[in-house]
Amino acid sequence: MHVDHHDLYSEFPELRDAIDTLKAESGFFAALFARYNRLTGKVEDLEEHDMPVADFTLEDLKKARLKLKDEIYQLLMAYRIGQKHCA
């Protein structure tokens, strides 16, 4: 089965520097980043290995991942806006 990879560097290539900076400077962001990667790993593992799992379970994992991704994106945008105001 073909599986799309959803790592944050691929999802937000234009924000690579902001991701790296926030991971280094914010424990909260680093924890969200790690949680997103763990969740993505679970989803991709289930999809790649066609593991038997209820459809709603996989969908719930994907929804949780999307919620985390949205939260991370908001933090990245806030960081980027803050950088523009400091320049």
Image: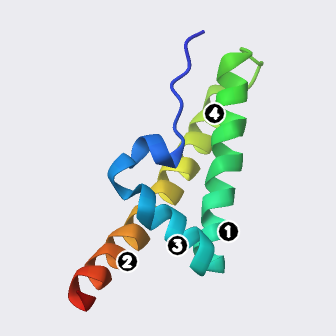
Residue at 65 percent across and 49 percent down: it is 37
- Label 2: which residue? 79
- Which mark is drawn over residue 31? 1
Quadrant hosting residue 10: top left
At a point 42% along the width and 72% down the height, the residue shown is 75
Type of amino acid at the residue the image marks with label 2: Tyr
- Compared with 11, 56 (above or below) is above
Q: Nearer the viewer, mark 4 or mark 1?
A: 1
The alpha-carbon separation of the residues under discs 2 and 3 comes to 8 Å
Q: Earlier in the sequence, mark 4 or mark 1?
A: 1
First in residue order: circle 3 vs circle 1: 3
Q: Nearer the viewer, mark 1 or mark 2?
A: 2
Few, some or many residues within 10 Å of mark 2 (<14, 14–19, 20+): some
Q: Secondary structure beneath disc 4?
A: helix
Residue position for label 3? 22
Between disc 3 and disc 4, the foreground one is 3
Sequence order check: which comes first, mark 2 or mark 3? 3
Q: Say which label, 1 or 2, has the lower sequence index.
A: 1
Disc 4 residue type (three-letter) = Leu
- The secondary structure type at the circle numbered 1 is helix
Q: Earlier in the sequence, mark 3 or mark 4?
A: 3
Residue 74 lies, with reference to residue 87, above or below; the image says above
Q: Within 10 Å of the Cα at label 1, are there few (<14), some (14-19), or many (20+) other Cα atoms?
A: few
Q: Earlier in the sequence, mark 4 or mark 2?
A: 4
Task: Using the rendered image of the protein, determine whether residue 20 is visible from the camera's viewpoint.
Answer: yes
Residue carrying label 4: 58
In space, the residues marked 4 and 2 are separated at their CA atoms by 31 Å
Amino acid at pointer 1: Ala
Q: Quadrant of the N terminus?
A: top right
- Residue lying farthest front? 87
